Image: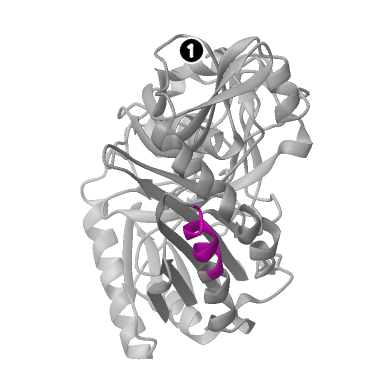
Amino acid sequence: MQEIAQHALDVAVGLGASYADVRVIEQEFQYLGTKNQTVSRLDLGSSEGVGIRVLFNGGWGFASTQYTTKKAITEATRRAVATAKASATVLARPVQLAPEPAYNAQWVSPYAMDPFTINLETKLAVLLEAARIIRAVKGTTMAQGSMSFIREKKLFVSTFGTNVHQTSIRSSCGIEAHATDAHDRQKRSYPSSFGGQHALAGWELVAQWDLLAHAQRIGEEAVALLTAPPCPQATTSLILEGSQLGLQIHESMGHPSELDRALGQEINFAGASFLTPDKLHSLQYGSSIVNLVADATAPGALGSFGFDDEGVRAQRVFLVKDGKFCGYLSSRDTAQLIGLNRSGGMMRAESWNVAPIIRMTNISLMPGNAGSLDDLIGDTEDGILMATNKSWSIDQLRYNFQFSTEAGWEIKNGKRGRLLKNCSYGGITPVFWNSCDAICGPQQYVDWGVPNCGKGQPMQTMWTGHGASPSRF
């Protein structure tokens, strides 16, 4: 890997590039899925390639190759430089990079048990047993399960002298129970929807979330939803459990705080943002108890790393402090446009074959002092608790939103009451966050993983994290 990367740097400098960086990535993956008592997905594979990014006369160029011969690397580097030369002719202003020290380092994500040492039969047995338990619940019509395991080795080198090796393992597990009658279809997921929980972890993640212990419960809840009353229409207190709140954070704080969107540079895929630079340090984004951070250093959270994809060390950056909007997700070429002296370290690429763009790391709501979820419910006179995302919709500025959840529960006189189906809620982002009046404590805090954040054109899918405790609005 080292020889390949150094050759690309040498070629780029020889062609006149003022800056170059190279990512060499090797990836091994397993995607497993079950449907009832059958294996519905077994996708095993690997990927290897090189991404080369250069600056020439202030213009960016990028090229990649899956071949690691010197000839292929030379040709890809020539393409990157040619693209940069063309870009430089149409720039309104040349790119300038915020300073960052050179690093020579290694980083390995935390894990207790390498999932690639666990045989496939053991992994599938967990999912198939969960399906058996779900289908034993009278009224269920389908059980689904999934796991994924990804090992990634990445070398980053640059002409500024950075040389960083990173190894990460990402794992996930989740199950779903479906119930259908002549009039309706409902489902319940665990630990969360869209594949369950995702984290920087090994096989221990599966043990931690104990799918078998929750299989019967979600089967029973899916069946109960068929005859549950629909969510009433009302303006009332809303409690969001952690995984749903994580997605709320993702859509209404994570995306609008991306500086390329805020500057109008990136408006693909529902881009742009209402958090324009004139609102920095002036907008009351939320109530005084709302503190949101972008923390790429959180141990085990899906959006953590040692260094981003332009060699900036992982950081913890406040986006909202005591309710006041105070920070962005930034990169080396956008930081100086708003007067920052350093990038926030948020440039990331899905793989070796695409250029890095500003992405979320772990965008998290700091825990409060409202105790447990039961404490919060007990302190709520009237309201609705909603759990587990089903769908979402938000405008291109991330200002107006609507979310629906798999399940809800009525709260009356401080007690959790009847189950409700087809629950949804909507609002305006700063109005919603300014209504936050209670956040559960650290014991309820979970770093929820979202592995499928889409952005850019061509679209890149990125893995992000969102720490949250149940909260009331």
User: In the rendering, at what x and y percent does residue 406 appear?
Assistant: 45, 37
Is residue 303 rendered to the left or right of residue 351?
right
> Residue placed at 59% from the left, 22% from the top?
417
Query: What's the residue type where badge 1 is placed?
Result: Val
User: In the rendering, at what x and y percent does residue 418 appear?
Assistant: 55, 24
User: In the rendering, at what x and y percent does residue 75 appear?
Assistant: 28, 81
Is residue 306 rendered to the left or right of residue 85?
right
* Nearer to the camera, 374 or 101: 374
The residue labelled by disc 1 is: 431
> Residue placed at 71% from the left, 22% from the top?
376
Q: Is residue 125 above or below residue 323?
A: below
Is residue 157 rendered to the left or right of residue 179?
right
Q: Which residues are magenta?
A: 129-137
User: In this view of the protein, can residue 108 be seen by the observer?
Assistant: yes
Which quadrant does the C terminus fall into?
Answer: top right
Q: Is residue 472 above or below residue 146?
A: above
Q: Residues within 10 Å of mark 1 (few under 14, many from 20)?
A: some
User: In the rendering, at what x and y percent does residue 122 appear?
Assistant: 59, 79
